[in-house]
Every structure is written in C-alpha cells, then in structure tokens.
Amino acid sequence: MQVKGTQLLRWTRQTDDGQQSMLIAERELTDSAQQKECKMYTILVDALCMDCHSEQLLNQAAVTEGVVESIIGLILFDFLGEIAMGEVRVIFEPATDDHPSIYRLRVPATGLNEMIETPIDLLQARLEHAISCELLEHFHTVVINAVDVEKT
C-alpha cells in the first residue's frame, strides 16, 4: 500500500471471522520505487525441523504455530511489502528412543512487492536462506523441503 511516498508494511492474518491487520512499519519510497508497478506473489514454505531447543516452541502446538507464523511473516516483510499469511500448520511428533522431536511446518502466504525487481529464482533462494537461518535459532536440524514462490 502506498500513501504519499510512504510504504506501509502491514501484517494481515486470515482468521475464521475475517482478517486482522496490524501496521508494522513505514518507510519512505524513492521516486523510482513509486513509479514501479506492484507484483503479487504466492509463497509456500514447507520445512522439517528436528530437536527443538527453544523454550518458546516446546510441546505446545498453538504457541508453535504463532511463533512460526511470526518468524516466517517477519522474514517475508524483509523481502516484500504487504503480506497476508494463510493457515500455518505445524505437525508435532514428540521425541522417542528412535528419533528426536519432529516439527513439520507448512506456511502459505501472499505478498505484494513494489520495492524491488528480483527474479523469482533469486527471491526463492534468498527466502530459503533467511528462513533456514532463523529456524536454526530454534531447532538443531532444519530441512527446507520447498520455498515455492509464484508470481500471480
């Protein structure tokens, strides 16, 4: 969203009873950025994380979904202007004698980019790197199955 040379960064969360939107930040646009057209992207992050070492995420599915949504949402804000997060899914398997705790993450989102001209493959690679680095702050092992970005 653009207002008099300022980009408003909003985090929109889709809920059952509608959408909730929260203003995160504002930043001034350059003249060249104001003249570029907006590009809409759909993003799907699919990851497998093992052996959680973050107290925020231990054994609480609802809390885990919120934290994962925050992590991914804030990373997407670094790359895109306005974000609408879809339903975050976290499947948790507790640790056993055979394997450590496992978290399967699936995060859909839609983003609007009016700031930069970035090829999709480069945007995908940058998102994958940023997401894996941030998830490694919470898990010992992170496997990014996919970070799919499509221009819509």
Image (tube, helix red, strand yellow):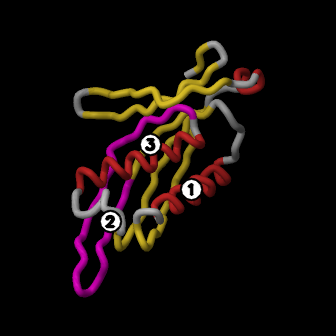
Residue 65 in percent (x, y) is at 31, 51
Residue receiving disc 3:
109
Q: Are marks 2 and 1 in contact (CB under 8 Å)?
A: no
Residue 51 locus on image (x, y percent): 35, 73
Per the image, label 3 sits on a secondary structure element best described as strand
Residue at 49 percent across and 58 percent down: it is: 134
Q: Position of residue 15 (x, y in %)?
A: 28, 34
**What residue do we see at 31% from left, 78% from top?**
100
Residue positioned most to the right: 32
Which amino acid, mark 3?
Ala
Neighbor class of circle 1 (other Cα within 10 Å; few <14, some 14-19, many 20+) is some
Q: Residues within 10 Å of mark 3 (few under 14, many from 20)?
A: many
Camera-nearest label, 2 or 3: 2
In the figure, is residue 44 to the left or right of 118? left
Q: Given the current orientation, which residue lies at the most extreme front position?
A: 55
- Looking at the image, the residue that sits furthest to the top is 4
Cα distance between the residues tagged 2 and 1: 18 Å
